Amino acid sequence: MSGRPRVFVTRPILDEGLAVLRDAGCEVDVWQDDLPPSRADLLARVRGASGVLALLTERIDAGVMDAAGPGLRVVSVHAVGVDNVDVAEATRRGIVVTNTPDVLTETTADFAFALLMAAARRIPEGIDVVRRGEWRTWGPKVLLGTDVHGGTLGVVGFGRIGRAVARRASGFAMRVLRHDPGLPAGPADAEVGATRCEDLRDLLVASDFVSIHVPYGPATHHLIGDAALEAMRPHAILVNTSRGPVVDTDALVRALAAGRIGGAALDVTDPEPLPPDHPLLSFPGCLVVPHVASASRATRTRMSVLAARNLVAVLRGERPPHAVNDEMVARAVALALDRNRGRL
Ligand code: GLV
């Protein structure tokens, strides 16, 4: 058996990240398929791993931690959202969970704004018209959309990405409302001229565009359901680049079918992937793309490197750049120093 720490990577990430793991002396096992490992494969392949570098598609829970065994020190998530990891369970076991914030903020905000504009100006519908050979002439009533400039943007969740979207909106002379109950009014609002809405409903009734940027968890499950959609303006467009289940899909289908909102632009859905015959895809004003908001080459490279650095740092007994369960880090640093002395 090799003395090098074993690391399981649940998909081929960009080479730069794999190089960080290999250069650090890890024994790197990469799942070589474009689709995620099955649960059985995941359980088999994590056995004996000191680190797991996981994507958002893998559920990392007690079963995976058991399968890995007591040597598991770190679960490094190649994403900012860590709702696929049982962080409390990891913390109980002294396992550090890390993620990749910051490096994807601007790229994801670009994409949220692109979705907003595409839906507002009906760009996908225009593309379809041309592709289907239905572009017959210039017409004064063809594909009339909603102006983005001068509109009101409601940002739900005013963390890094929400604020970056708000900054883009200020370049379009938009009024920005934001809802984030944990965040009192402050410099982040002043920077983009945002108005804080204590009550989500106040934001929903006044916004032409509603963009979701909350982390997913019990508190945000179906945050946007029947009542929220009912409160939105009839022409308003919902943009979601956070996590699918923040929006109640059935409620959204009902709202679109009844024409209660103007449209939706979704990078994330529930379920994911969305089956091709899903009712959401039957509405011309609902645009769905396959969870790619952070997918620029530069950002995916940075994410792979950061995920790898996080993992290596924990195995080396150093403070990782981004730990989710910070309280674990000091303990894990001490433990890892002990276990990995001389191995990395
Ligand atoms: C992507 O969805 C992420 O959380 O990074």
Image (cartoon, rainbow, N blue to C red):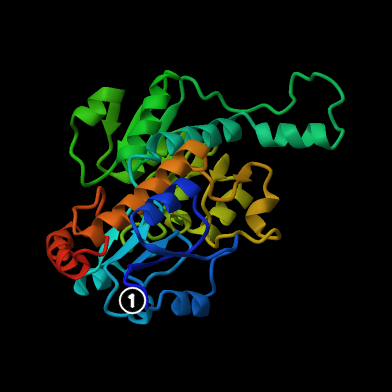
In x, y percent, where is residue 224? 43, 52
In x, y percent, where is residue 291? 53, 50
Left or right: 292 as drawn, with respect to 171: right
Q: Residue at x 35, y 44 (%)?
A: 201
The residue that disc 1 covers is 65
Corner quadrant of residue 190: top left
Q: Residue at x 40, y 78 (%)?
A: 47
In x, y percent, where is residue 109? 43, 35
Corner quadrant of residue 118: top right
Q: Is residue 214 visible?
A: no
Q: Please say if 186 is above or below 240.
A: above
Tell me the amino acid under the disc marked 1. Met
In x, y percent, where is residue 197? 28, 38
Q: Where's the C terminus, which quadrant?
A: bottom left
Q: Total marks drawn?
A: 1
Left or right: 327 as drawn, with respect to 293: left
Q: Is residue 143 visible?
A: yes
Q: Where's the N terminus, which quadrant?
A: bottom left
Left or right: 81 as drawn, with respect to 129: left
Which secondary structure lies at badge 1? helix
Q: Residue at x 42, y 59 (%)?
A: 222
Q: Nearer the viewer, residue 42 or 82?
A: 42
Q: Residue at x 20, y 73 (%)?
A: 92
Task: Categorize mark 1 by other alpha carbons within 10 Å: few (<14), some (14-19), many (20+).
Answer: many
